[in-house]
Image: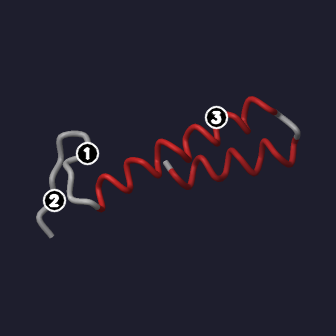
Amino acid sequence: MLILGLILLVIGLIAGISVLWTIGIVLLVIGAALWILGAAGHAVGGRKHYW
């Protein structure tokens, strides 16, 4: 989700399409939050990994 958000952010910025830019920012924020929760050991989406 982080990579998709970054790609959409860059495409929207280069092409001047504000909708893609906005969606990219939202995906980056959500992806970062899920990544932080997963790294902190919380089960994200009902999944918990033990390694």
Mark seen at residue 28: none
Residue 38 x, y percent position in the rendering: 29, 55
Determine the CA span between mark 2 and mark 3. 29 Å
Circles 1 and 2: CB distance less than 8 Å?
no
Disc 1, SS: loop
Disc 2, SS: loop
User: Mark 2 Cα within 10 Å, few/some/many (few <14, many 20+)?
Assistant: few
Would residue 36 appear left or right of 8 to someone viewing this image? left
The residue lying at 38 percent from left, 55 percent from top is 35
User: Mark 3 Cα within 10 Å, few/some/many (few <14, many 20+)?
Assistant: some
Residue 32 x, y percent position in the rendering: 47, 52
Residue at the bottom extreme of this rendering: 51
Judging by the rendered image, the residue that carries numbered circle 1 is: 44
| Labels 2 and 3: the sequence-earlier one | 3
The residue lying at 21 percent from left, 58 percent from top is 41
The residue lying at 88 percent from left, 39 percent from top is 16
Reply above or below: 32 against 39.
above
Mark seen at residue 23: 3
Would residue 37 appear left or right of 21 to someone viewing this image? left
| Labels 3 and 1: the sequence-earlier one | 3
Determine the CA span between mark 1 and mark 2. 10 Å
Residue at the left extreme of this rendering: 50
Residue 33 x, y percent position in the rendering: 42, 48
User: Mark 1 Cα within 10 Å, few/some/many (few <14, many 20+)?
Assistant: few
Reply above or below: 13 against 26.
below
Disc 3, SS: helix
Question: Of 32 and 2, which appears nearest the observer?
Answer: 32
Judging by the rendered image, the residue that carries numbered circle 2 is: 49
**The C terminus sits in image quarter:** bottom left
Question: Of 40 and 7, which appears nearest the observer?
Answer: 40
